Image (cartoon, rainbow, N blue to C red):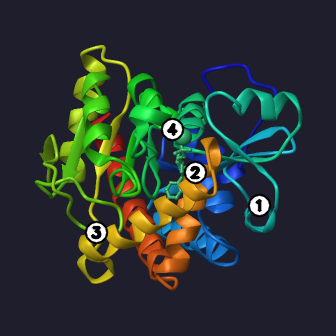
Amino acid sequence: MKAHAPFVDIHQPVVDALRAGKPIVALESTIITHGMPYPANAEMAAKVERIIEDEGATPATIAVIDGRLKIGLGSAERDELARAKDVMKLSRADLGFAIAERRTGGTTVAATMIAAHLAGISVFATGGIGGVHKGAEKTFDISADLEELSQTPVIVVSAGAKAILDIEKTLEVLETKGVPVVGYSSDTMPAFWSRNSPFKAPLRLDSAAAIAKFHTTRRALGLTGGMLIANPVPEQDEIAADIMAVHIAAAQDAATREGIVGKSVTPYLLAKILELTNGLSLKTNIALVENNARLAAQIARALNVSK
Ligand code: PSU
Ligand code: MN
C-alpha cells in the first residue's frame, strides 16, 4: 500500500499475491452496477475473474461497499453488488465522498485506476473507457477517465472507447494529455462492439511482453500517467459498425428527447442499445470484457518478468 488508508480492505488472495509479487489484474465495478443488467452482470463478473486466474494472475474487483474501499471482492460480496439497486457511480470526484459517507458504489475506470494504484496494482481490464461524448462541443460531457489516464500509472486494457462516444475527439484529447493509445495487433482503433473504426490506432504493439516493456520504459523516463490498450473484440463476437451506428444514433436521439444528462448518459445509452439490439450488444460487451481480461493477465505476467 502506498498510503495509510484505514478504509481499505484488501481481499486475502490479493494480499497474498501482493506479498509474493505475483501478477494481479484490477477490474472495475461500474460495469457491474451500471453497465449490465442482473444476472448477466454477476455472471460476467465471475467469469472474468476465472479467466484471469486461468491465465495465472489474481483478479481484484474494486468497489466501495458501505464506505470500505474493496480491493478484491469475495463471490458473495460481488453477487450482492450485482443485485444492488440505487448504488453510486464513482469517479475521481466522488470516490472520497462515498468512503466518507459510508456509501456503496461501483468504481468507474477513473476511480478503479486510483484504487489500483493505491494498492500497487498496475494492470486493469475493463470493457471500454469513457471519453468525449458526441455533441461535447455543446454539453462539455468529457469523461474523467481521460484525465485519470493522464495522471495515474496504470495500464488500462479496453476495446477502445465505447462507440457511443466521439472516438475521433476522444483520441485527440488523449493525445493532448500525453496518453499513449496502443492498438493490440491492430492498426485501427476498435469501436467497442466492432473491431474497427475509421480511425488509426496511434501506436501498435503485438505482444503482452512489448506492452510491458513500453510501460516500464515510460516509468524509467519519469513519465507519469497510464496508457490505453485498445484490444478489438474477437471476430466471431463483433457487431458490424454500420449496424451499430443506426442503434447508437437512435439511442442518442432518445437520450436527448428524455433530457438525460451527466452521469446517467452512459448507463442510459448502454441500456437503450441493449434493448434496440435485442440483447446482442450485451453478448458482445461480455465477450470483449473477457477478451480484455485475458490480455490484461498476460500483460501483468509479462510485467513481472521484466521487473
Ligand atoms: N465499459 C463497459 N461498460 C461500462 C463502463 C465501461 O463495458 O458501463 C463504464 C466505465 O466504468 C467507465 C464509465 O469508466 O462507463 C464511463 O462513464 P462516463 O462516460 O460517465 O464517464
Ligand atoms: Mn460524462
Q: CA distance from mark 4 to mark 1?
A: 22 Å
Where 69 falls versus 197 (above or below)? above
Helix, strand or loop at label 2? It is: helix
> Residue 156 vs residue 102: left or right?
left
For residue 186, which numbered disc appears in the image? none
Mark 1 and mark 3 lie on one chain; the one further toward the N terminus is: 1
Q: Which residue is mark 4?
A: 121
Helix, strand or loop at label 1? It is: helix
**In this view, the mark in front (4 or 1):** 1
Mark 3 and mark 2 lie on one chain; the one further toward the N terminus is: 3
Hey, what amino acid is under mark 1? Leu
**In this view, the mark in front (1 or 2):** 2
- Please tell me how crowded label 4 is: few (under 14), some (14-19), or many (20+) other residues with Cα within 10 Å: many
Q: CA distance from mark 3 to mark 2?
A: 21 Å
Hey, what amino acid is under mark 4? Ile
**In this view, the mark in front (1 or 3):** 3
Q: Residue at x 48, y 72 (%)?
A: 286
Q: Which residue is mark 2?
A: 265
Residue extending farthest front: 257
Whether ligand 1 has any atom under 8 Å from the Cβ at mark 4 is answered as no
Whether ligand 2 has any atom under 8 Å from the Cβ at mark 2 is answered as yes
Mark 4 and mark 1 lie on one chain; the one further toward the N terminus is: 1
Q: CA distance from mark 4 to mark 3?
A: 29 Å
Q: Are marks 4 and 3 in contact (CB under 8 Å)?
A: no
Q: Residue at x 37, y 67 (%)?
A: 291
Q: Which residue is mark 3?
A: 194
Quadrant (top left/top right/bottom left/bottom right) for the C terminus: top left
Q: Residue at x 25, y 58 (%)?
A: 190
Q: Are marks 4 and 1 in contact (CB under 8 Å)?
A: no
